[in-house]
Amino acid sequence: VVQFLRSDYRRSPVVRLRAPCHPWWTEACGYAAGGRSVAGILVGRRLVLIIACLAAGALLLRLDGITQQSLSARELHNALLARRYYLGAGAGLPLWKQRVLEELRQTVQPIEPPVLDHVAAWSYRLTGGERIWIPRTLSALLWVLGGVFLYRIGVRVTTGAGALVALALYLFWPYGVVMSRTYMPDPMMVALLLGGALAVIRYWERPSRERFASAAGVAALATAAKPGVAL
């Protein structure tokens, strides 16, 4: 009986152990197993170097001219909100400036949760003045961070070369370059949307309560960042 059970156990397709069908850096099936050979490690390091160069180049491209004046009405709206949070009650200001600040509180209201605006106001207090290039730089960093999530999604749904092409288009498409260096919540929303998509894919690769909670949490944050667009 024991010998029969052992032979049946070995023949069972349910319990038979199989080699992973995907590279070691991802859990998604459907890829040819590569192993951790010397050549594989060198290729992996080369990919990391390429991705780092793309990210650095994209960030430098966005920092060029980041202190210039903007004609965007939406960016002006966020800058006024940050000024309002920065000045607070207006203690110590002349009376006419306090009246202007009060009018600002009544007329300029947040369109979405003012996370970036509060961060900008905090940076103004830290540096001792209103420097709009700080939230613009944060927006550029968030957009580049979204590229990391996009690449990790790409290697799961296409080839490594396809993931690099997608990353290059994402980082250097002219519209994305212009929009990602403005003081608006859109770069934060895009980064969170990509992070949420990656979290969902990781959940389906290996379902667990922790990964489900992570995917749900990041997706909720992406929706809250800019509800009218993220939905």
Image (tube, helix red, strand yellow):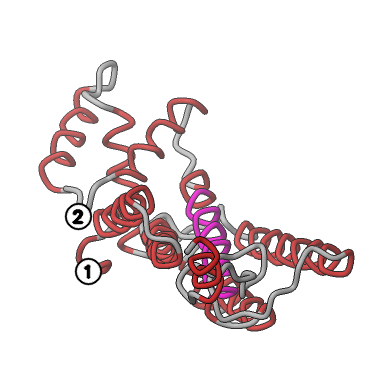
Q: What residue sits 82% from the left and 62% below the top?
A: 41
Query: Residue 168's image quarter?
Result: bottom right
What segment carries the magenta color? Answer: 138-156
Q: Is 71 located above or below residue 218 in the figure?
A: below
Q: Disc number at residue 231?
A: 1
Placement of 201 over or under 217, stated as above or below: below
Single out the mark in the foreground, 1 or 2: 1
**Where residue 155 sits: x, y (%)?**
60, 74
How many numbered discs sit on the rendered protein? 2
Nearer to us in this view, 201 or 87: 201
Residue at point 31% right, 58% down? 219
Please tell me which residue is depicted at 22% across the width and 53% down the height of the picture.
112
Front-most of residues 162 and 73: 162
| Residue 89 placement, left or right of 202 | left
Farthest residue, direction top? 92
Res 43 label? none
Q: Amino acid at mark 2?
A: Ile
**Is disc 1 placed on a helix, strand or loop?**
loop
* Residue 111 disc label: 2
